[in-house]
């Protein structure tokens, strides 16, 4: 079992340094997925337009030239026109319009002419074919209906009563002849054809009016007879009146019944009190008012009183009693005769016993009660007759109410038929009046406002418009082609695109240099950075008055500084520098980063772990006799394989070695390699491993877990986006840390060297001018001080 690497155990090595661990201050994360989405922000779009500007310009220029040539080769088309006034505009027209509105015509348009329909009629074959025949005979042309309609245009001039007719043709003479014939043909049409339809309408209306009038008269007579038959004007009103009358009669009936019951109750009470019938009560009342009858009655009562008195002393046979009896018998016939005289022969007089009672005696109370009894009897008879009459009236009203629905239906049918017939009659009369008014309005023909005119300037082709459209179409086509090329060109072009796609920290930007790209400085002692430092030193000696350094050198110093900032508590001691594909500049970055770190005072070791195509010894100009392959395959010590870069005491290099092993992956994944990495990291401040490209090879992925992480080099304009995405996916699967990316080959403003040159680099002429100004200011100050002393 292989031992756990020292940087994972957290143990200290011999010189007191902690083996490299993942920095605490910054924990880099590999993005889960880098989408190649279609969402382009404005900045990326502007960068794309800047890169593909020549494509857009070339395509736009080609389109404009093609459209311009096509426009110049087109046949010139001329246009002519004339105007027709198709409706009157005088005051008589306004009066006729007011009359039309008075007669009930609903007119929603200000004009009585349907212009859309009229234009279609004027463009129809029926109107144009006769005109075309005249055109062909008088103008010597061979026009057809289809060809004329294609170039003929009839429109209404805004909201006026004017029709504008225009015609286009390459020959101006033909245009003038065609327009003249058209204007004459349209005026003839307005004089003849338009009147015929109106007259036909008037004739049809006049033929229909007698029949409609007869129908209206017949229905009016039927309605009149119906009203006379049932003696009603309106069934609905009549039904309401009958219902109201029935309600009133029902109330009267109830009131009469209540009154009848009251009178009957009073009659029974009075009859019980008097004990006589109403006839006898009438008789007693009449006798009580007769003085003679009362006198005879009083005499009879006196005789009877005397008889009673005498019988108290004598017996019945006493002469006195007998005399009184005779007198009594004589008074009774007289009393009956008087009663008969008072009551009449048909009335039976009261008996003697009744006459002797108090009935016929004059008493106000009894007389009043008798009178009430008689009145009650009379009222009962009257009320009974009244109730009977009310019942008969109620039955008659109910019978009429039951017949009202049938009567109402018949009345409604007659009224509806009469209404329809009347409306039809009114409509025909209104149409007749409108047609007559319209005929009066259209008696005047259309007027030709201006003779046909042909414009000297052709209407087609429109050169300025076509050129503008060509420019727009060319730009759109160019942008489309540029976007297509951008989609097909699957490489990184800018720093923003790189950061957006990878979602990783951008540790550094390496400016593009044509000499470095050509490889002219490969094999130089110390490499490109050493040469740059020597040039910078010479320039500094020549111009010691200001700071001067190479932008290329400053970019690697910035890269080293950014790497050191990744870990504040535990510095980054070892990194793997690799790329997704070959040719991205990983070896160049490794060599120059090592030199920049050594120049900043660190003890640096550069290990060329690319045992397939090693490049470090070529870049730095070193020998490759003994290197990493020899160190892993034999028993030599690490110091025997190390070389010190000439002029760099702090920079040691282990090249790939010679010969190259047949299976570098087995050597890099061996336990001896892991132990060697621990040993080297304990001796140096920074160990840089230059490995083969990650994509397709496992060499770099075997070393990354035993270092602080991977620094991925991406070359702008070359590295494929899909390759970088696949590389990051592989690193995520191997649980390796990716510290960030380095953009190699940046140009223009995307490069930090642009701002460096802008800030530090000044023309020599400007420097001399500033020096002259400073000397002049010093001399002026000296003169001022001397004047003050004087």
Image (cartoon, rainbow, N blue to C red):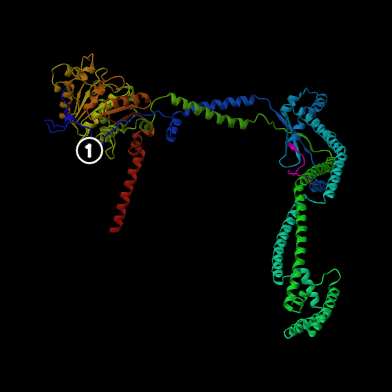
The segment highlighted magenta reads 104-115
Q: Estimate the x, y position of residue 282 in percent, counting from the top left.
A: 79, 71
108 is within the stretch colored magenta: yes
**Predominant secondary structure in magenta?**
loop
320 is within the stretch colored magenta: no
From the viewer's side, name the closer residue of 175 and 209: 209
From the viewer's side, name the closer residue of 636 and 74: 636
The quadrant of the picture occupied by the N terminus is top left
Residue 296 image-quadrant placement: bottom right
Q: Could you tell me if residue 720 is visible in this image?
A: no
Q: Secondary structure at mark 1?
A: loop
Q: Could you tell me if residue 200 is visible in this image?
A: yes
Residue 170 image-quadrant placement: top right
From the viewer's side, name the closer residue of 167 and 335: 335
In the rendered image, which residue does mark 1 sit on? 568
From the viewer's side, name the closer residue of 356 and 376: 356
Q: Residues within 10 Å of mark 1 (few under 14, many from 20)?
A: few
Q: Is residue 429 left or right of residue 474?
A: right
Residue 433 image-quadrant placement: top right
Q: Estimate the x, y position of residue 405 in percent, counting from the top left.
A: 75, 46
């Amino acid at each position: 079992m292989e031992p756990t690497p020292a940087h994972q155990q957290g143990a200290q090595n011999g010189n007191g340094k902690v083996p490299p661990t993942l920095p605490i201050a910054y924990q880099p994360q590999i993005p889960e997925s880098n989408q190649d989405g279609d969402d382009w922000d404005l900045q990326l779009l502007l960068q794309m337009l800047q890169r593909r500007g020549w494509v857009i310009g070339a395509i736009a220029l080609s389109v404009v030239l093609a459209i311009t040539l096509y426009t110049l080769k087109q046949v010139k088309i001329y246009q002519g026109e004339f105007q027709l006034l198709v409706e009157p505009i005088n005051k008589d027209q306004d009066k006729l319009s007011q009359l039309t509105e008075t007669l009930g015509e609903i007119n929603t348009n200000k004009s009585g002419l349907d212009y859309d329909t009229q234009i279609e009629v004027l463009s129809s074959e029926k109107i144009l074919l006769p005109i075309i025949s005249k055109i062909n005979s008088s103008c010597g042309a061979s026009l057809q209906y289809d060809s004329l309609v294609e170039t003929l245009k009839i429109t209404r001039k805004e909201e006026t009563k004017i029709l504008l007719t225009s015609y286009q043709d390459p020959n101006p003479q033909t245009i003038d002849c065609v327009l003249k014939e058209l204007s004459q043909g349209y005026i003839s049409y307005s004089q003849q054809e338009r009147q015929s339809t109106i007259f036909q309408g008037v004739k049809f209306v006049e033929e229909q009016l007698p029949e409609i009038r007869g129908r209206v008269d017949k229905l009016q007579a039927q309605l009149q007879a119906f009203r006379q038959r049932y003696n009603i004007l309106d069934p609905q009103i009549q039904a309401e009146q009958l219902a109201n009358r029935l309600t009133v009669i029902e109330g009267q009936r109830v009131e009469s019944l209540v009154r009848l019951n009251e009178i009957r109750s009073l009659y029974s009470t009075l009859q019980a009190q008097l004990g006589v019938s109403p006839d006898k009560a009438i008789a007693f009342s009449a006798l009580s008012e007769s003085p003679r009858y009362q006198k005879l009655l009083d005499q009879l009562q006196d005789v009877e009183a005397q008889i009673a008195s005498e019988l108290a002393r004598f017996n019945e046979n006493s002469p006195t009693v007998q005399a009184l009896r005779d007198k009594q018998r004589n008074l009774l016939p007289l009393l009956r005769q008087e009663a008969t005289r008072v009551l009449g022969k048909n009335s039976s007089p009261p008996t003697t016993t009744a006459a002797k009672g108090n009935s016929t005696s004059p008493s106000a109370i009894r007389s009043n009660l008798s009178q009430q009894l008689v009145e009650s009897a009379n009222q009962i008879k009257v009320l009974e007759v009244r109730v009977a009459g009310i019942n008969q009236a109620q039955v008659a009203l109910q019978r009429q109410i039951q017949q009202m629905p049938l009567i109402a239906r018949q009345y409604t049918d007659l009224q509806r038929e009469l209404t329809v017939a009347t409306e039809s009659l009114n409509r025909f009369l209104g149409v007749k009046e409108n047609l007559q008014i319209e005929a009066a309005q259209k008696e005047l023909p259309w007027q030709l406002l201006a003779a046909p005119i042909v414009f000297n300037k052709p209407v087609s082709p429109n050169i300025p418009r076509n050129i503008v459209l060509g420019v727009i179409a060319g730009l759109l086509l160019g942008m489309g082609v540029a976007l297509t090329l951008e989609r097909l060109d699957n490489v990184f072009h800018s720093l923003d695109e790189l950061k957006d796609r990878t979602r990783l920290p951008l540790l550094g930007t390496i400016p593009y240099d044509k000499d470095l790209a050509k490889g002219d400085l490969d094999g130089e002692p110390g490499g490109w950075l050493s040469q740059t430092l020597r040039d910078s030193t010479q320039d500094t000696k020549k111009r010691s008055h200001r700071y001067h350094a190479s932008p290329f050198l400053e970019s690697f110093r910035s890269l080293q500084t950014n790497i050191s900032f990744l870990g504040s508590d535990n510095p980054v001691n070892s990194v793997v520098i690799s790329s997704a594909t070959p040719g991205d500049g990983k070896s160049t970055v490794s060599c120059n980063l090592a030199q920049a770190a050594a120049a900043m005072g660190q003890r640096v070791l550069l290990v060329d772990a690319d045992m397939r195509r090693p490049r470090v010894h070529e870049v730095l100009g070193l020998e490759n006799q003994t290197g990493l392959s020899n160190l892993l395959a034999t028993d030599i010590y690490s110091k025997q394989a190390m070389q010190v870069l000439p002029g760099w005491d702090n920079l040691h290099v282990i090249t790939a070695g010679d010969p190259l092993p047949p299976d570098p992956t087995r050597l890099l994944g061996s336990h001896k390699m892991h132990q060697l990495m621990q040993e080297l990291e304990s001796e140096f401040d920074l160990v840089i491993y230059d490995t083969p490209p990650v994509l397709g090879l496992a060499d770099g992925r075997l070393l990354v877990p035993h270092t602080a992480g991977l620094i991925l080099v991406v070359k702008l304009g070359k590295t494929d986006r899909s390759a970088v995405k696949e590389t990051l996916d592989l690193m995520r699967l191997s649980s390796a840390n990716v510290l960030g990316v380095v953009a190699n080959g940046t140009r223009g403003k995307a490069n930090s060297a642009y701002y460096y040159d802008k800030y530090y680099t000044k023309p020599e002429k400007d420097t001399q001018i500033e020096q002259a100004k400073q000397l002049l200011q010093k001399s002026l100050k000296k003169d001022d001080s001397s004047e003050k002393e004087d």
